[in-house]
Amino acid sequence: MLLKNKSNQRFFVSLCLCLLIGLFFFTVASAQVNPVTNMTAAVKGTGLEKNTNLPLLIGNLIKGALGIIGVLFLVLVIYAGVLWMIARGEEGKISKARSIIITAIVGFIIIMVSYGITSFVVNLFKAAPVAEVDSSFDFSSF
């Protein structure tokens, strides 16, 4: 078992103790805050308190997801670079690292093109006029 070693047991006990103490302090601190006020302040910071239309919201979500995928590209390139550096001349590891880098670059190009298209479409929706609803229509004639 993992906890046969004394140092592992001490680490596990201290980790549990820290989590319990942290949970206690979080509970005490969060009881002193009004959650509705904090939610309102958080929403104001995001710009979502305005009545935004659905295509604009979807476009912003897609742009955010593409940004996260861009970070994944960076992680892949760093991983492949480290793999290449520690390959020690072994052709199998070098070719694996090279293929990861090439695949990541192709994926990055696809991400950049899709980000550009998404940005273009979202800007079109931002510039499009919003249709006004005529509330003076009399439905009693039906």
Image (spheres, rainbow, N blue to C red):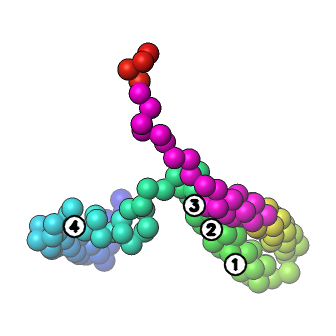
What is the distance, in whole Å, between disc 3 and disc 2 at their CAs?
11 Å
Residue 14 lies left or right of residue 100; in this view the side is left
| Callout 2 touching callout 4 (CB < 8 Å) | no
Foreground residue among 95 and 113: 113
What is the distance, in whole Å, between disc 1 and disc 4 at their CAs?
42 Å
The disc placed on residue 78 is 1
**Label whose residue precedes the other's in the sequence (1 or 3):** 3
Quarter in which the N terminus is drawn: bottom left
The answer to whether any part of residue 130 appears in the image is yes
Numbered disc in front, either 1 or 3? 3
**Magenta-tinted stretch:** 113-138
Quarter in which the C terminus is drawn: top left
| Callout 3 touching callout 4 (CB < 8 Å) | no
The answer to whether any part of residue 122 appears in the image is no
The residue indicated by pointer 2 is 67
Residue type, numbered disc 3 = Asn
What is the distance, in whole Å, between disc 3 and disc 4 at their CAs?
25 Å
How many numbered discs sit on the rendered protein? 4
The disc placed on residue 60 is 3
Rendering coords of residue 141 (x, y %): 42, 18
Please tell me which residue is depicted at 28% across the width and 65% down the height of the picture. 40
Secondary structure of the residue carrying numbered label 4: helix
